[in-house]
Structure formats: structure tokens, C-alpha cells
Amino acid sequence: MRDLLNKDEVEIAEFCQEVLDLEKAKLPDEYYYTSVPLCVIESVFSIGVRYEGVKNTVKRYCEYFGLHPYRLEPDYPTPSEQQSVEHFLRSFDELGLEEFVHTVFKNRQRTSTRNGILKTEAVHRFCKVLNKYGVNYLQDVKKLYGNEQFEEEIKSIPGQKSGISLIYFYMLAGEDNWIKPDRMIIRFLERVLQRKVKMDEAQTLLQVTSKILSEKYPNMTPRLLDYQIWNYVRNNNL
């Protein structure tokens, strides 16, 4: 019966077992950031660029402010061990946009080539919205889930309309049930299914696929499967 109801997902699950090392699947360090601002920086700067550049941007930010980027345990650090969103905003106000661009991030990328704003400014706007909704620490992020007004405000930031950065932010902050439906994930799914796959369809496909795979791999989640697929596409230049 499952094969009839979820033919596509069964096909994806079978292909994943063929090409991915699911026995050893684990999330990389960036899924264990020590603070909310680091999740925002990664989620905004990661769109449409090579990942090494994103890592370098986060690294430069951490070096400038003397931060440890990754936590050693899966559990969130205590608030006193995190850089708060308010601290990020105060630092931004003190240094200014241009100083942040040239000295802190050392990155002049824009959210899009046409009518885009500096990604640095997008990070600042993202954090201002988070602050408005009372999010300072990683423990606060869960209060945002399902808040349509918050999500609309984030999507109104130039370059954030698709919602991909927002979804990735949730994932980096600890949400296991989302996937980042970027071009690499879509490319993988289209290759398996031999048809076009819409961005919002990708979420459902991998959510059901991860449930199928969890019968054999108990730790499998949509977020973990998303990363395994992304890493496979990246390493194989697909």
C-alpha cells in the first residue's frame, strides 16, 4: 500500500540508500552554532554562492568579536554563553554598515544582482525583526514557529522573498523537520524522479522519504537527509 501512496518517495528513498552513506549520516558543525546571529549570517550569505565563502564570512565575524562558532554538545548553551541578537544590533549600530562590510565580514555580496541590497544589510534587517519578536537566544527561536506575521516581515527583506534563507535559519537553529529547498536539492530530486520538482513540493517529498528511511536509520530526519543530499550533489558536481 505504501508503494502506491508514496511511489515518488519510495523511489527517492531507494536511490538515497544506493548513493548516500546513511549509516554514518551526521550533521556538520554549522548546525551547532553557539548563537542566533551566526545562524542568521550563514542563512543569508549562503544563498547563490559557493559554501567556502560563507564559512570564511562566519569565521571572520567570529574572529573579530572573539567568538567560538560551534558548541561542543547538541544542547543549546546557556544564554550567558551566547552572543545575543541585541549584542549584534548594538555592535552594528556602533560600527555602521560600511565598517561591518569592509572590516567585519569583508564581504560585499548582494542579495541579488538586480535591485539587491548588501547581504550585510539583510543580516541586520533579519536580526532587527528577530529582536522585534523577542528572539535573543537560540532557546527563543521556537516561539517563532508558525508565526505568519514574523515570516512575512522576513520575506519582505530584499532577497528573502522565496523564504529559503528563513527555512535554513530555522534548520541551523535546531528545527529538524525542515529542508532547505535550494537548487542542489531540487536538482537531486529531479534527477531521481525524471521530472520537474517545485520548491514547496521538495519539503513534502523529503519529509515522507525521511520517514521511510527512519525505519532502517532511526536517527533520520528531514534536516539530516537534506544535508546528506546537499553534500552528495556538492561533492559530485551534479
Image (cartoon, rainbow, N blue to C red):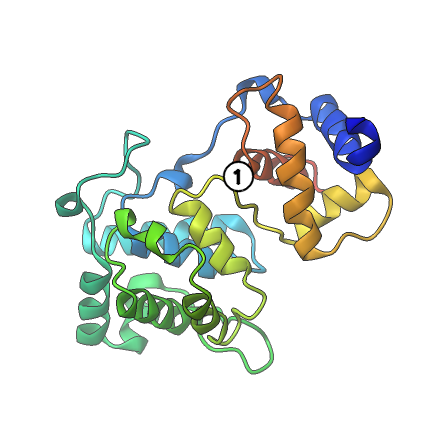
Quarter of the image with the C terminus in it? top right
Is 209 situated above or below 139?
Answer: above
Quarter of the image with the N terminus in it? top right
Whole-percent x and y of residue 191?
81, 42
> Residue at label 1?
223
Whole-percent x and y of residue 152?
48, 71
Q: Residue at x 47, y 78 (%)?
A: 117
Q: Residue at x 33, y 31 (%)?
A: 74
Whole-percent x and y of residue 87?
18, 62
| Amino acid of disc 1 | Arg
Is 217 situated above or below 60?
Answer: above
Q: Residue furthest right?
A: 194
Residue 11 in sight: yes
Q: Nearer the viewer, residue 55 or 34?
A: 34
Q: Residue at x 24, y 42 (%)?
A: 68
- Mark 1 is surrounded, within 10 Å at the Cα level, by few (under 14), some (14 to 19) or many (20 or more) other residues, namely many
Q: Residue furthest front?
A: 1
Whole-percent x and y of residue 51?
52, 49
In screen coordinates, is 21 left or right of 70? right
Q: Residue furthest bottom?
A: 115
Is 173 situated above or below 118?
Answer: above
Residue 60 in sight: no
